[in-house]
Image (cartoon, rainbow, N blue to C red):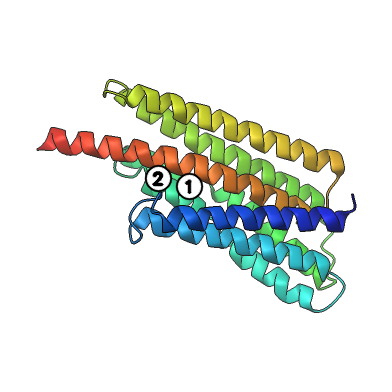
Amino acid sequence: MDVEMINILLLGTNIGFWCIGILFYIIQLTGPLTSLVSILYLFTIFAFGLCALFNYLVEVNIDNSSAIIFQICTFIFSNLSASYFAILVVNTYKVIERRWLYFLCALPLPMAIAVNLWCLVDTLNIFKIETGMKIYALSMVGDVLVIFTEFTINFICYIKFHKYKYIPGFKSLLTQYLSGMIFSLLIDVAVRIIIYYLQLNPHTFAQLSIASAYINLNIEFFLLNRIRIVLMSHIIINNS
């Protein structure tokens, strides 16, 4: 299978995930349509979808001037995809200590710098400006930091939530959350093994990573949202 066909299949997969995400929002599986977490979920779904689309358009237009416009759009929407981590903060800011919240907000910064550096170097390459940096190495570093950041944030949340295991039914939620974390990590590792084994170019690399991110977003969003609802109900009852 050639690279063009792989790109088309991955774009189709990401469009499918995008449609599923929109459906989840419309039928209010994410909560009320106007709630902050639902709006953030919808925003993240759109950011992922547009990032996947523009990555594909860069790849198929790499030899003409349109690639520059599409690359700039990719740069913008890859940054907007950081709303993925905003969802984690919204679902945890009322139930964990303030100092840990600051730490969770700071943790994605190295990842954001690495991903932006990759996008910047890739953009400069399209402008035929040589930087001497290996784009494939940069994409791998950024990707490893994405996986590390995502798993670390979820693991910290799991540890902080564990003290509430005495709440009826909460231990089962924690088990589901831990299972979701491990499943997400396994998906990430499996996807990256495929990427490295096939030596896919950075834009195909990004498409496959976005597909993985869609899966992780839904696993973590719905589990964290349920945990937040249970904890907030418990806190309200105790304070009443």
Q: Which one is nearer the viewer's eye here, 152 or 175?
A: 175
- Residue 59's x, y, as percent? 80, 64
Please report the residue visible at 37 percent of the width from the left and 25 percent of the height from the top: 162
Q: Which one is nearer the viewer's eye here, 123 or 4?
A: 4
Residue 96 appears left or right of 59: left
- Residue 88's x, y, as percent? 44, 45
Name the amino acid, label 2.
Tyr
Residue 105 appears left or right of 150: left
Please report the residue visible at 33 percent of the width from the left and 26 percent of the height from the top: 170
Residue 206 visible within the image: no
Instruction: Measure the C-alpha gap from mark 2 to mark 1.
Output: 6 Å
Binning the other alpha carbons within 10 Å of mark 1 as few (below 14), some (14 to 19) or many (20 upward) gives few
- Residue 164's x, y, as percent? 30, 26
- The residue identified by callout 2 is 102
Residue 150 visible within the image: yes
Residue at disc 1, secondary structure = helix
Residue 87's disc is none
**125 vs 3: above or below:** below
Name the amino acid, label 1.
Ala
Residue at disc 2, secondary structure = helix
Marks 2/1 in contact by CB < 8 Å: the verdict is: yes
Please report the residue visible at 71 percent of the width from the left and 49 percent of the height from the top: 208
Q: Which one is nearer the viewer's eye here, 173 or 154?
A: 173
- Residue 209's x, y, as percent? 68, 48
**206 vs 99: above or below:** below
- Indicate the quadrant containing the C terminus: top left, top right, bottom left or bottom right: top left
Please report the residue visible at 77 percent of the width from the left and 63 percent of the height from the top: 122
Residue sitting at the far right? 2
Q: Which one is nearer the viewer's eye here, 159 or 57?
A: 57
- The residue identified by callout 1 is 106
Examine the image and state in which quarter residue 168 appears. top left
